[in-house]
Image: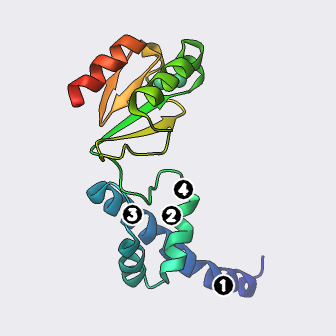
Amino acid sequence: MSTDLKSQMQEVLAPLQGRQVVLIPALQAVQEKFGYLPEVAMEEIGRVAGVSSNVVYGVASFYAQFRFIKPGEHMIKICLGTACHVRGAAGLAKSLERELHIEPGKTTPDGKFSLEEVRCFGSCALAPVIVVDDQVYGNMTTTKTKEILDEFR
Ligand code: FES
């Protein structure tokens, strides 16, 4: 690669590198604090990073880790990864949906619980697994799941 082409390439990539470095940690920091990314976050992060709110939203929406709707007071995640699946996670997921009267990705009308499906927490030896807030519960059954929900109600 000629020096001229290399310097042109660096010129093209330089702003993108800076953008990635600033945007992802900023998005993570806001979500960590608020539990989701409110609309105003796109504008504020954009202002700090020197890009439009559309660019910020474009980056955030690319990653599944970011949420745009305020989650419930308690986040319930059920693992549907392979180890959990073969040990009955699909049935547990259905029982959670019935118990909470919501689908995955939704929040109960009272704002108490949100439900999400995840593809492995890295706790496969405990399959099937659910996580409530940051607490991992392993070897779950429908009965145990109901008991855990009752603790948080
Ligand atoms: S597959 Fe469920 S924790 Fe790994």
Tell me if I can see residue 140 in this picture: no
Say whether marks 2 and 3 touch (CB < 8 Å).
Answer: yes
Q: If you read the primary sequence from the N terminus, does the residue marked by circle 1 or circle 2 appear first?
A: 1
How many angstroms separate mark 4 from mark 3 (CA)?
A: 12 Å
Tell me residue 75's x, y (percent).
34, 40
Q: If you read the primary sequence from the N terminus, does the residue marked by circle 4 or circle 3 appear first?
A: 3
Q: If you read the primary sequence from the N terminus, does the residue marked by circle 2 or circle 3 appear first?
A: 3
How many angstroms separate mark 4 from mark 1 (CA)?
A: 31 Å
Q: Is mark 1 within 8 Å of ligand 1?
A: no
Tell me residue 62's x, y (percent).
58, 60
Say whether marks 2 and 4 touch (CB < 8 Å).
Answer: yes
Which residue extends farthest right?
Answer: 1
How many angstroms separate mark 2 from mark 3 (CA)?
A: 9 Å
Tell me residue 59's x, y (percent).
54, 67
How many angstroms separate mark 1 from mark 3 (CA)?
A: 37 Å
Q: Mark 2, mark 3: which one is toward the viewer?
A: 3
The disc at residue 7 is 1
Q: Mark 1, mark 3: which one is toward the viewer?
A: 3
Q: Callout 3, which amino acid?
A: Leu
The disc at residue 105 is none
- In this view, the residue in front, 40 or 2, is 40
Q: If you read the primary sequence from the N terminus, does the residue marked by circle 1 or circle 3 appear first?
A: 1
Q: Is residue 28 left or right of residue 92?
A: left
